[in-house]
Every structure is written in structure tokens, then in C-alpha cells.
Amino acid sequence: MPDRTLWWDHPTTSLRFVNQTLLPARYEIIRCGDVSRLEQAIRTLEIRGAPALGVAGAYGIALAALNSTAPSHGQFISDVEGSAFSLKRTRPTAVNLSWGVDRVLERVRTSPTISEGRVAALEEAERIAKEDIAICHALGEAGAALLPQRCTVLTHCNAGALACTEWGTALGVIRSAVEKGKDVQVIASETRPLFQGARLTAWELERDGIGVTVIPDSAAAFLMQRGEIDLVMVGADRVTRTIVYNKIGTYMHAVTAMQHHIPFYVAAPLSTFDLHSRSDEVVIEERGREELAWCGDREILPHGVPVRSYAFDATPLTFVTALITERGVLYPPFTFENMLPPQPPL
Amino acid sequence: MPDRTLWWDHPTTSLRFVNQTLLPARYEIIRCGDVSRLEQAIRTLEIRGAPALGVAGAYGIALAALNSTAPSHGQFISDVEGSAFSLKRTRPTAVNLSWGVDRVLERVRTSPTISEGRVAALEEAERIAKEDIAICHALGEAGAALLPQRCTVLTHCNAGALACTEWGTALGVIRSAVEKGKDVQVIASETRPLFQGARLTAWELERDGIGVTVIPDSAAAFLMQRGEIDLVMVGADRVTRTIVYNKIGTYMHAVTAMQHHIPFYVAAPLSTFDLHSRSDEVVIEERGREELAWCGDREILPHGVPVRSYAFDATPLTFVTALITERGVLYPPFTFENMLPPQPPL
């Protein structure tokens, strides 16, 4: 079982997290005592993964509340709101970040005093982290039944313990299935440009003793053609009424899975669902040229050649066989009736 | 206009070629005086690309003939046949290598003396190189008409001058279209694991002043969804009666292009056509773990995690809008009637 990815360290009044940019070469724990360091961590992907970003955002507001030196309650609220605004701006696509920030901010806003606001903020952030763990396990249980007794699963990017507080979403389902005695082999697409599949998913599964093989992203379709993939299981950064936003490459896997009649599952907690936004309102983050231009110490792109590097893509729900949530499995047509996921205040 | 990729250097009686593993950082010309150095160059991809491999194989037999110290004509033939066998084994999927080797070998076999065999071998290799240039230009002319006056073309890997003697196949079509005054933008998928798209295609097009943008392989489908790609143009390593074998990732592009009703063109000289082999007879080369495990100086894969790294994949002709050859454009149904491509002796 994996360690936790991020947690509150009471003795030092700070957030601690695993630096995901250094894995698998180095397992480094960062101590983060203020919002600007946290923003840096989110921007540089030291912390990444939609559920983990939700928890990080929540702790970020706790840090803002604890660090505020505002002389008045009004100024205190305004300080924390400023941090909330700035935190939410760091990564625009994953909805969980805003969701975690807003949920704690609401507790700060409705607390009558500064000290009560501080207590409430940390309490709420801790609750969100605890809930995240329970949710991943519930989601894993719900999804495990979808896996045949013996199967090979393609996953993309990292939707594992590292993307959450622990256990994972897509990898949580796989872990739960393995726990139930199923024989699951995983094919991890390496996930260019930052190799979250090769670096993080392979590292997590190897540690857990779950068989994992890494392939170039572009090879998945060919392995499907050869009958070597039984199903696809990915996470999500945002699920709207019509579209799953997830790591660039997800859409490619969805199209090729449909071509080969292979089930395509998306595992995501309800905090990832955004039933309010229209697709033209969702900002798809673009990343910098250097992530594609350099390979370690080697410059692989000629000078002056530009790149297009979307961090995410958009998979219409028409490609999705089922959505796996902590409240169970949703099948098409996805009406989202009787679903009341926690939503940020409008 | 690009320089030549490989050529015979008469003063030194050796083959010279551009080392493609070092681009774009360094433009290095290698002098190759014997078959074992040439085999190393082919195995390590210093020389790569189906048509270039055909020419390299041809020159390899010329080298074998020139270097043989056999005392008898029978021993001479047997020496050259040994080199032919060994050269053909270096890369099994691209058919041109065998084709070039066999064409020159046949000239050696039918020459009555050692010295005539040597002259005939070099003459035939030079003819193949010259033909390759003419063929790429004819193929480019034939294909250029398929491109709209203003369009964005997705290409994969490198089917450019570097993959041939000069001009290129897929990029030859693009060059010919640009020469005719068409406004062509190219999107090059980087082509994991060895980045031939980012390193070689981007380098070639940048030098020619043709607009090129590099994307991760996994982003092509999303750009198709966004309407940013008008057509796909790739080369081929082998075309059988039912399947196009080309760089891993080609099949993914073909499936996603069909999903978006985007034309998918394959540009290949007739020397790439193999109308004799069945698909179960074609060996798809697998490459070593280190190509995926390392990114420059950085090890990105945890120790002990295995990879699957096919160098090529198989795209059924049902996904192909048209095949572009030096004799014109072929459309479905591909019957290959009245086509008499040069074939290796059975």
C-alpha cells in the first residue's frame, strides 16, 4: 500500500508532500509553509493529479488563514480570498483545485472570528483529505467489479495514489480488483511530455507488485489491434455533462478503444464533476515549449521551431463506456440525475 | 533544397552519409568503408528511412564486392552473398533494404568475373541512388495535386530527404506542393521514442522555410477534433496487398483520421511495395528497453519495469485514402493491377 502523497504536519504547521517531479530517481518530501511555495509546487507539477490538487488547494487556504497577519476580521477574509484567487489561477483545467479552495474558503468566510476561521480552515482541509481517501477506496470498490478475473488494462498518465491522497482513482480501481484476487496486468502509456505514466504509474505499481509494462503513447492503438488490451481505465481532471477533460492523449485512447470495441472507463470522484460549465467555458491549459524541446540534457527540437502543447484534451462522453464514482458506476445515457456532487458556490 | 543524405565518395572509395542520430544538434558526415560499419549505422539508425535503407543496402553490396579479397570467382560471390545476408538481417521490417541488397547482388551474381562484378555492383548502386532521387520527385509531383491550395498537414516520423537520398516521400509531396505555390503548414508529431519527427522532420522543414509545429504524438487526435488538421501524409516501410507497415504511431493516426473524416495518404516508392508477403510473414522489429527508459541523461523508468517497443505498426489499407507512388496515385479498391514494382528474386 502506498504512502500518502500529501499530509498536514502538525508539529511544523505546514503541508508536506512528495515531490512528483523527481520520481522515480528520488523520493523527496517537501515541507511547504506558505501559499506561494504551494503555488510553485502546483505550477511545476511537484503536486499534480485532480484529487491531489483539490486537497492541496484546501490546505493552501488553511495555510493562508494561518499565515495571515491581518489586524481585522475583514482584512483576514480579504487576505484569504486573495490567496484563493491566486491559487485557483495556477492550473485552470482541473476543477478539483477550485473545488477544494472554495470549500475551505466558505468555512473561513462563515467563521465569526479570525481564530475560529483558522481552526475551521484547517479542520475542513483535513476533512477533505480524509474524505479523499475514503472516496478513492469506495470508487475502487465500485469499479473493481468491472474488471474481468484476468485482464490487461491500459491506463494513461497517473491516476494513482500520487494523483490523490492515497490509493488512486483509475489505479485505485486496479488496486481494489487485485485485492479481490483478480489477475490484472497493466499497460502504462508513458505520457509525453512529462512521462507521468513511465515515471509515476510504473513506480507505484512496481512498488505494489502489480505487473506493469510501459509503452510509447502512440503504440496503444497497435496493441489494441493485436488484442493485447482488454479495457482502458483513466482518471479525469474535469467531467462536464458532455465531456471528460483529462491528460492529453486520453482522447486518442478513447477513439482507438471504440474502433476496437474495447471498454473505455473513466474513474473520478464527484468532486471532479462540473455539471455547470459549458465546454466553451473550460480553459485547456497549454504548457511551455521547453517541455517538448528538451529530453533530459538533450535539446531535441531545432531552434525556432514552435510547439503546440495542450496539457489536456476533451473526450466526449459518447466514447465513455461507464463513469466510476464513489457512489457507484454510471452508464450511458449520462443524465446525472439524482447526483448532487459538491459544487463550488456560484 | 536539402543536401543529399548518402552518396558514394569516389576519391576514397567509400560511402558517406549524414549521421541522423545527432541531428539537430550536430550535422556530421560519416565515411563508411566497409559492410560492418554500415551494418552498425543501420542498426543504430545513423541511416534510417525505407528508401535510404534501400540505397544504403545497395552501396553495402558494392562495398562488399570492392572489399572482397577472394581468390576465386566462386568465393567472391559467396563473400558478397554473406554480406547480403548479414546486411538484410539488420532491420527486418522495411522491405527496401532487402530490395536494394538483392538488386545489386543479382548484378554481382551475373557478372562473369570479379572485376566486372565490382564495376557492376557500384554501377547498380549508383543507379539506385539516382533513381531514388528521380522517384521522390515524381512521387512528389503526383501527390502535390492532392493538397488543397492552403492546408495543414500532419506527418509522423520522418519521411523526408533524410529518409531517402534527397527530397523525400511524404515530405517530398509537401515540398512539391510548396514549389507549386501552395500554402502548406506542417504539424510534425514528435515520434517517440527516438523523436524523428521533432529532430529530423522539424529540422528539414525549418531549413526549407516551410512552417512546422511539433506536437506530442498523443495530441494529434485532439487537434483533429479541433479541426486543425486537413490531411495526414506519411511514408511507409513496407506496403503489402492489405497493410501499410510504418513507424509506430501511424496506425493511431490512421484510426483517428478516419474518425474525423480526414484524408490519410501514404507516400511510398514502388520499391517499398511487397505484393508477395502475407501479413503473418512480416516481422515487426522490437527495439530495446533503453530507448524508452532513458530521456537524455535522465532515467525515467523504474528499474525492473519492462517495455513493449515495436518500431513499426500495421495500418490496414482500409484506412488509407490513397497511395502516392512515382507512377501516380492509387485509390481504393487497391487491386495493384498493372503494377509491376521491382521485386526481390524469389
Image (tube, coloured by chain):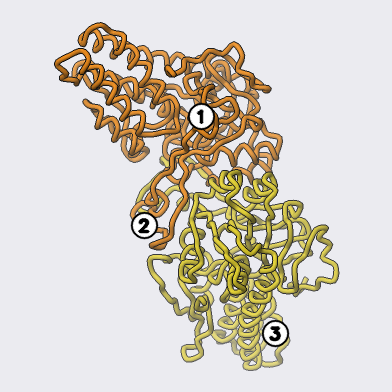
Chain colours: A yellow, B orange
Q: Which residue is mark 3?
A: A107
The secondary structure type at the circle numbered 2 is strand
Instruction: Residue A346 in the image: state x and y as whole percent.
Output: 78, 71
Name the subunit of mark 1.
B
Q: CA distance from mark 2 to mark 1?
A: 31 Å
Q: Chain of mark 3?
A: A
Displayed quadrant of residue A147: bottom right
Callout 1, which amino acid?
Ala
Q: Are marks 2 and 3 on the same chain?
A: no
Instruction: Give the foreground label among 2 and 3.
Output: 2
What kind of element bears circle 1? loop
Q: Do the CB atoms of the residues marked 3 and 1 lie less than 8 Å apart?
A: no
Q: Which residue is mark 2?
A: B298
What residue sits right under mark 1 in the picture?
B236
Image depth: mark 3 or mark 1 in front: 1
* Place of residue B124 in the rendered image (x, y in percent of width and height, measured from the top left): 33, 12
For label 1, the crowd category at 10 Å Cα-Cα, with few meaning under 14, some 14 to 19 and many 20 or more, is many
Instruction: Identify which residue is drawn at 26% across, 21% down.
Output: B80
Q: Earlier in the sequence, mark 2 or mark 1?
A: 1
Q: Are marks 2 and 3 in contact (CB under 8 Å)?
A: no
Instruction: Report the side of A284 relative to A17 (left or right).
Output: right
Q: Residue at x 34, y 20 (%)?
A: B58
Kind of residue at badge 2: Arg
Subunit under mark 2: B
Q: Residue at x 47, y 91 (%)?
A: A11
Q: Amino acid at mark 3?
A: Arg
